[in-house]
Image (spheres, grey):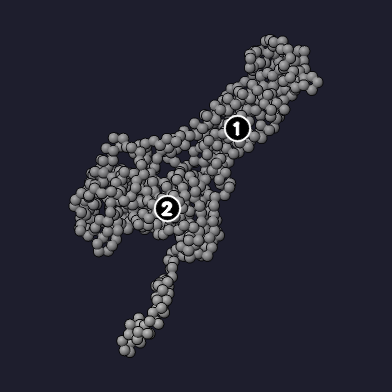
Amino acid sequence: MKGSGNFNAWDVFARGPMVVRFLALPLLVVLAVMSTGQGPAQVPNVTPATRQANNIAVITIKGEINQTTLRSVVRRLQLAERAGAEAIVFELDTPGGDLMAVIGICTAIKASPIKNSVAWINRDAYSGGAVIALACREIVVNDPSTLGDAIIINSMFGQINQMAESERQKFLAPLIAELVDSARRNGYDELLVQGIASRGVELWLVENKATGQRLCITRAEYLMLFGQEPPQVAPALASAPAIPDSEKTRTAQKDLGSQLDEFLKRSQRTGRRGPGQASKQTVPTNPDDPNRYVPAAPDMAPMFNDVTSAQELPTSRPDLTPSEAGKWTVIEYLSTGSGPFIFKADQMQRYGLAVGVVRNDEELKAHFNAKHLLRMDQTWSEGLVSILTWFPVRGLLAVIFLIALFVEMTHPGLVAPGGIAAAALIALIAPPLLINMASWWEIAAILSGIVLIALEIFVLPGFGFAGILGLLLLFGGLVGTFVPQGAYFPDSPRARNDLLYGLATMVMAVVTSGIGMYFIAKNFKSIPVFGKLVLKDPSRVEDGQDEMLAAMGPSASPIKKGVVGTALTPLRPAGRVELPGGRIIDAVADIGFIATGDKVRITSVSDFRIGVEKIEA
C-alpha cells in the first residue's frame, strides 16, 4: 500500500521478476525458519507480590506425625523467623499421624508472623499431612503426588476399629473447624475440603453462567437449583475405602440427613429456624451468623454450633436460594460420598487447591523468584526422641531398667547394673518429658517408687506396705508417661487408647523382666558378665581351676535344714554363706537384711533356692 511505510518481503517476492524471485527464495526460507525458531515475544514470569520472597526456608515433614514432629516444626519455624525468612515452605511426604499434633502444627503456621506459607506436596500428604497443607496460604505439588484421606480412625494394636458416632464427632468437630478455617483463609471451597475428612460428602461442581464462579453443592442444593434428580454418572474423584457402618449408624445418619435437609429448606424460606425444631445439639442456634458453618454431609449437621463458634472469618460462599435456579450449570459430578476424597496432582490444580507444579529446589526458588533457599530438616536428636518414644522401644527400655534395678539391689556394689538402670530410666522419662507426654508428678512417682522399694529391701524387715506402694508408684508413673498431658478430654477414646497402649506395654515389660530376673537369679555365676564379679569359693578352686571344673568332681554332701553358718556377704536378700567345713553356698534371706558376719540358720532347701534366717543373739 502506497505511503503505508510497511515493508513485506513476501510482497516483493510475489511482484518481482522471475530472476529476483528465484534468487530471493532461499533467503526467504531462512528468514521464515529463524522467525519460527524465535517464536512470539516471551512474557516475563511475573511473581505475585504476595508470593515473592528473596529468602525462603524449607521445613521438611516426613514420616508419621507425632508430638516430636510438632515440637520440631515449632522450633524450626521460630528459627526461620529469627533468620529473616520471607517465606516458609513445608515439604510434605507423610501418611499423617496424631490429630492433636497436626492441629498444633496448623495453629503454629497460622500464628506465624511469616504469612507467606506454602505447602509443597512431595510426594504424598495423606490424613494429617493434607490438613497441614490446607493450612498454608497456597499449595504446590510434585507430579505425581497425592492429597487427602483424613478420616478419623481408632487404631488399637494395628487394628482399625469402628468408632461410635458420638466419639467420632468429639474429634471430627475440631478437625472440620480447622479445615473450614483454612478454606476461608486461603480461598478453598468449604464443602470440598470437608470431603477430605468425612464420609457421606456427595458433591457436584457447578458454575455460575453470568460470573463464571465455580462452587461445590450438595444433593439438597442440586435438587433446589435444577429441580430433578441428578443423572447417574461416574464421579471425578476417588474415595478412600471406608470402614463399613453398622445398620444402626446408617439409620442415625439418615435421620440426621433429614434434619439437615429440613433446616436448609427452612432457612431458605425464612432465614431462621422455626421454634421447637429438633434438639440444640443437631440444629443451628443462629443460621444468620455470617461465620456460620455449612455442613457438607448429613451426619455433619450436629457439629454446626461447635464449628461455627470456632470460626474467625465469615463465609464467602453465596447463599443459594430457589431464586438461583437457572443461573447455574453443572460442570461435573465430584464424589459419591462413599469415603474421604483423594486428589492427584492434576486434580488439585483443577479444583483450586494447588497453584502449580514444583519438582525440585530450583523450580521452588523460581516459584518465589527467590535468591536464597535454606533447608531446615529434623535434627538427629529429634529423630532419636521419635525412636525412644516408640512404644516397642519404650517397652524394651522398661525391661532393661527393671532387670538392671533388680541386679543392683540384689547384688549391691557391682556399680554397672546401677548405671545401666539409671541410663534406661533417663531414656524412658526424658523424651516424653521433652514432648509433653510426661509431667513432673509422673517423674516424682517413679523416683518415689524406687526409693520405697530400696527402703523395703535394705532397711525395713520383710516386704510390706512400703514395697507394695513403691511398686504401684513405679508402675503407675511409667504408664502415665504414655499419655500426653492435657491433650485430651478425660473420656476421649484417644486418651483411653494411649492408656491401654501404656498398660499393655508395661504389663509385657514386667512379665518379660520377671522371666529375666528368674533366669539371672538361677544362673548368675554362669553368665560371663556377672560371673567375673562374683567372689570365688576357695574351697572349690585348686591349682587355678575355676568353680565349673571343681563342680565336675564328686558331689558334695547334701545341705540340710537347721545347719548354722556365717554370712560372707550382705544378704539383700541374696548373698553367700559359709557353712561348717569352709563350704560356701548361695542363699537368700527369708526376712529382711542380713549383714556380713551375722550367724544364719538354713530354713529351707530346694533345687533352686536355699533360704536362711538370722540367728538373734
Q: Residue furthest right?
A: 543
In the depicted structure, whether residue 112 falls above or below residue 521: below
Spatial CA span between label 1 and label 2: 45 Å
Coordinates of residue 341 in the picture (x, y in percent): 35, 48
In the picture of the structure, the residue carrying the numbered disc 1 is 400
Q: Residue at x 33, y 87 (%)?
A: 4
> Disc 1 or 2, which lies upstream in sequence?
2
- Inspect the image, locate mark 2, and give the three-letter code of the amino acid beneath it: Pro
Q: Residue furthest bottom?
A: 3
Coordinates of residue 541 in the picture (x, y in percent): 77, 20
Quarter of the rendering containing residue 32 = bottom left
Q: SS for tag 2?
A: loop
Labelled disc at residue 144: 2
The answer to whether residue 547 shows anywhere in this view is: yes
Quadrant showing the N terminus: bottom left
Quadrant showing the C terminus: top right
